[in-house]
Each structure stands twice: as structure tokens, then as C-alpha cells.
Amino acid sequence: MSDGIMSKAATMEIPISSNGDTGSLPEDDGLEQDLQQVMVSGPNLNETSIVSGGYGGTAEGIIPTSTIKGSGLHQPHPSPAVGGEEVVRGIAVEKFDIVKKWGINTYKVSCFPGRFGRGSRTVDLELETQIELLRETKRKYECVLQLARAFTNHFYSLVQTQHALGDAFADLSQKSPELQEEFGYNAETQKLLCKNGETLLGAVNFFVSSINTLVNKTMEDTLMTVKQYETARLEYDAYRTDLEELSMGPRDASTLCRLDAAQNQFQSHKDKYEKLRADVAIKLKFLEENKIKVMHKQLLLFHNAISAYFAGNQQQLEQTLKQFNIKLKTPGAEKPSWLEEQ
């Protein structure tokens, strides 16, 4: 009797409403891998106990499978009757949930063949390679952007410290006649370094701003189109698979009507897919051209400004900002000057 109950539970169907609604079921990212195992062996009911007497049985009716050896059954000692019914009911409900999940997941596979790998996947190798290269490039540029911002913050602190140190030297120059000259030229040195530092900050801020625009606006806009393209490809594959399956079926009146509808849906999603594929190809082409143009200018700016600053070449540093149409705000601001592009 117990074998019959579990056999019935293992093969029972999960009722689905007429509109195919399975309730509020959470999406499972690992569903496809789990289903490959469960579809072969069915729901795992081995790691459990055999229940006799149905759901209303007592604890004495539970025989753990671990006590079954060969052809003999070793009856465990009866457990107390108090709470026994709740234990049996909990085990039965847990195993019913396993069967329920198995049935619903099987239903999902049959309803969404394209999503779970039943249909073939359309692949554009050249385009997919370019998309993956863009994603990798974006990750690397984000790293450069993060480091450049860190450099800016640290260098800003250095310039502020130089400014404060110069003020301290100038004050001591006025109050220490015997060391007036020494404090004086140290104050002038820090003042000059502070001025050159603000000029370098202007160049680096321009570099950071340009990289930020390239990464978080231009590249991101292209990747948004890529996401739309990938969604369209999934839909196209799903409707293509439906059409292929209907085409291989019988050609009665009902099937021909469904086949015509499937053909229309397939064509609509094919057009959408091909349009987005063309859009992605064009955006990738223009993005690459724009990236080269922007980075050529910004890398030259960064190199020339850094080199001039650490070489102590004030004239070359100022010339670099003029070359790239960068000007600083008027002196006297509380913070180092922010760049302005003409």
C-alpha cells in the first residue's frame, strides 16, 4: 500500500489553470541545470521515509529507508505518539512540494523551449566578438577612470598642503628676522609649486571628465542597444523554433491557422532582430572611431601635462593647457581651479 501511495505521488500531475498561470513562482537562474538532473531521475524521493497508513498514520508507521538491508526489514523502536501525526504530515507535505516543483518546472520547459535551450541559438560570431571586446574595454577604462580620480584626489590634497606650508613659511619670514631670507625663498617655492599644481589639476580634471563621458555615456549607450539586440535575438529564436515545430506537424485546418499566425510573429521578430543587429554594428563602428579620437587627444594631454609639471617646466605646462583649449578660473578660489572647456 505504501509503495502505491508514493508511486502515485511521483507520477501525479500538477493542475495548471486555463491561462497557463502557475502562480507567483520566483525565477530560478539555475533551473536549466537542475532540470537536466530531475528530468532523468524524476523527483528525488529516495532520501526519505516510507509512510504507511496515508497522511493520518502515526509515528509507528514510519520506517526509515536506512534500516532496509537486503530483503529484511528492521523495525525501529516505536516513538512516542505525542506529535507523531504532525511529524508524518510535515514529511508528506515536504515530499509533495518536491513533486509539485518538479511538475511545474517540467511545465516551464515545455512552455519556453527557446529560453531553456530546446531551440537552436542564432549566433553572429563577428558581432558577438566585438560586443565582448567592448565589455572588456569598458571594464579596463573604468579601472583607468577610478585610478585617475584617485590621483586627482591625492594631488589636490598635496596642493592644499603646499599652499598651507607656503603661508606658514611666509608668516615665519615676517616674524623671524634672522631667518627671514630662508623662510622667504621656501615660501616662494611652495607658492610656485602650488600654482603649477593647480595648472596640472586642470589638465587631469579635463582628462577624467573626458574618460567619464566616454565610459559612462558613449559606451553605456552602445551597451544599452546591445541589451535590446540580445533580447530581440532570444525572442526571434523562440518564435523561429515555434514555427519550425508547427511546420513539421500535421497540416489540418487548425494547424494551418496556427502556422499562419506563427509565420507572422516570426517575421515580425525577425525584422526587429535584424534591425537591432544592424544598429549595434553601426554603433560599434562609430564608438571605435570616437574612442580612438578621444583617447589620442586625452593621452597626449595627460602625458605632456605630467611631464612638464614634474620637470618643473612651468611654461610648457601652461602651453599644454592652451594647446587643448583648457583654461582655469581666476585665481583666489578656495579650491584648486576647475577646468573650463572653451
Image (cartoon, rainbow, N blue to C red):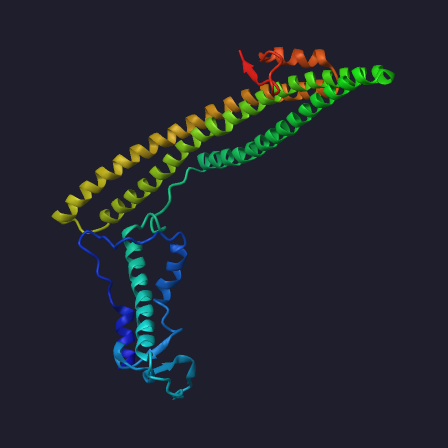
In the image, 85 versus 291, the foreground residue is 85
Q: Position of residue 29 (x, y in %)?
A: 40, 51
Asked whether, in this view, residue 48 is left or right of residue 260, the answer is: right
Q: Residue at x 38, y 29 (%)?
A: 278
In the image, 6 versus 250, the foreground residue is 6
Q: Is residue 264 above or below residue 340?
A: below
Asked whether, in this view, residue 68 is left or right of residue 215, the answer is: left
In the image, 334 versus 112, the foreground residue is 334
Asked whether, in this view, residue 196 is left or right of residue 149, the answer is: right
Q: Position of residue 341 (x, y in %)?
A: 54, 14
Q: Position of residue 183 (x, y in %)?
A: 81, 18
Snapshot quadrant of residue 85: bottom left
Q: Which image quadrant: the N terminus?
A: bottom left
Most extreme residue toward the left, as rendered? 253
Q: Is residue 292 above or below residue 109?
A: above
Q: Residue at x 54, y 23 (%)?
A: 209
Q: Position of residue 95 (x, y in %)?
A: 33, 69
Q: Is residue 119 above or below residue 177?
A: below
Most extreme residue toward the right, as rendered? 178
Most extreme residue toward the front, as rendered? 175
Snapshot quadrant of residue 308: top right
Total marks drawn?
Answer: 0
Snapshot quadrant of residue 147: top right
